[in-house]
Image: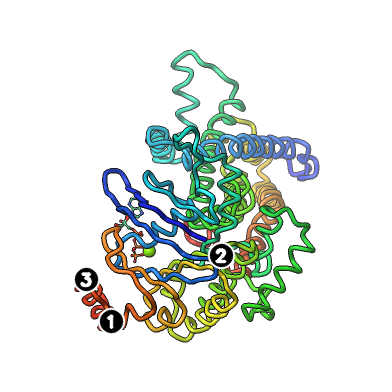
Amino acid sequence: MIEITALKKSYDARTIIDGITLSVPKGTVCGVLGPSGSGKSTLLRCVNFLEPYEGGEIRVDGELVGYELDNGRRALKPRREIARMRSECCMVFQQFNLFSHMAALDNVAIALVKVRGLKAPEAREKAEALLAKVGLSNRKDAYPAFLSGGEQQRVAIARALAMQPKVLLLDEVTSALDPERAAEVLDVIATLGREGMTMMMVTHQVHFAREVCRHMVFLDEGRIVEDGGPDMLARPKTQRLRSFLRHLRLA
Amino acid sequence: MDRSISVIQLLPLLLKGFGITLLLAAVAIGLGAVFGTLLGSLYAWGGRVVRAVLFMLVTIVRGVPLVVQVFAVFFMLPAYGIKFSAVSSAGIALTLFASFTIMEIVRGGIEVVPKAQMQAALSLGFSYHEAMRTIVLPQALRSMMPSLVNQGVFMVKATSVVSLFGVTEFMYVSKEQIERTLMGFEIMAFVWIAYTIVCYPLTALGRRFEEHLKGRGQTSLAGAGA
Ligand SMILES: Nc1ncnc2c1ncn2[C@@H]1O[C@H](COP(=O)(O)OP(=O)(O)OP(=O)(O)O)[C@@H](O)[C@H]1O
Ligand SMILES: [Mg+2]
């Protein structure tokens, strides 16, 4: 579903992603680990095309992300196409980023109206169903400021799911939450995983990752240092991953 | 002195002065809102040079008391041969002041909306303009509203400054009549009430808006102390 080939991305002169090749088959969850600054968020943002990239390619469901090839030359896709691809490949952020002037229900419904072109009542109906799915039916009229972190993040997941994306990109979605709130959110993600949602997930929750992720990659300085199955974290091969896991446990 | 006349008889004169006060305030607020919004948007979205120039201007304009700015318009422009009537000069000075104050409010309003709000909208497939219109600007406007209302109230009161320059607005006319009739108490009571009748509803409106935002857990610039 996601095919990343020799991806390169830099800010000014600094290379942030330095040749990443990675494939996430349909219906699987790929865990992304790595120290701070290793380029995990940047990788996800490239897949959603919130960031342009200079080298290599990203394909989602076979379609090149952000660019089109014109006689072998790369050119930006039309804006509408970029927006459409983003809506099929939604992102959930560490800081939730709910729209603060809208109640939970409207947060979920608004993109259905503005992006998918649904009528408001129909959008609300769908949004209600999604809030029920993340266990928040009773909070649908609450404004983000009155929701706990865990509730906000579940609304954010519902908001992304509303687009019925082919792929869900999760960037440290539980890092800003205490363990109990994090567990609420992880439950939702585990359920999505079982239902066959294709996901790419940056996380530091080692135990959770081992349960949910079919495939894992460990990034350092914009490269994949090690990749493997769920037991990669139990039996790390490289010194770099071993020391990273040691620091993670001490933290 | 002539005790036989009452405030009622002075009413047409006083109200005419009050009319000029309201006119000045309306012009300053109206034009100030237009220029202020333009300048504030320029500041928020403009390049480095635009920002530097605007920053310099705002520092110059807001670095001195309002009365000094009015002085400048009244006495500096004529020195260059640019002559306006007293009322026009007052209008220009107050508009200038309002523009730069509102510019700061608008800039602040746009800048307090976190970049992440735009990013979240884009990541869902919003177009840039749709995200601006449905996500960023409504939040900016909400946060600005109480400050804008306060600014309106302030402008109504601030017009009284130009009475020092012989503009026949409310305070000037009132002072004239007090000197003529010596009915200081009655006339001042009338002045007090007239200003209050205009300013209080505005203040109350601002407060209502503030409460409304608080009820939704949102903050306003005024609430944030900006
Ligand atoms: N907009 C930007 N402009 C310049 N440099 C940036 C920008 N965004 C990120 N970077 C740099 O890119 C590098 C990778 O950032 P990224 O956010 O992808 O790391 P990360 O692995 O997600 O880290 P963390 O675990 O702290 O979230 C960092 O060194 C960061 O300073
Ligand atoms: Mg990150």
Q: Ligand 1: which quarter?
A: bottom left
Q: Chain of mark 1?
A: A
> In the image, is A182 to the left or to the right of A18?
right
Vertical placement of residue A58 versus A40, above or below: above
Q: Nearer the viewer, mark 1 or mark 2?
A: 1
Badge 2: few (under 14), some or many (20 or more) residues near its Cα, within 10 Å? many
For marks 1 and 3, the one nearer the N-term is: 1
For marks 2 and 3, the one nearer the N-term is: 2
Q: Nearer the viewer, residue A86 or A230?
A: A230
> In the image, is A34 to the left or to the right of B14?
left
Please check whether the numbered discs 2 and 3 fall on a single chain. Answer: yes
Can residue A92 be seen here? The reply is no
Residue at the top extreme, as displayed: B81
Q: Amino acid at mark 3?
A: Arg
Gap between marks 2 and 3, in whole Å? 36 Å
Vertical placement of residue A135 versus A67, above or below: below
Gap between marks 1 and 2, in whole Å? 38 Å
Q: Nearer the viewer, mark 2 or mark 3?
A: 3
Q: Amino acid at mark 2?
A: Leu
Q: Nearer the viewer, residue B160 or A28?
A: A28
Q: Which mark is residue B19?
A: none
Which residue bears the numbered disc 3? A240
Which residue bears the numbered disc 2? A98
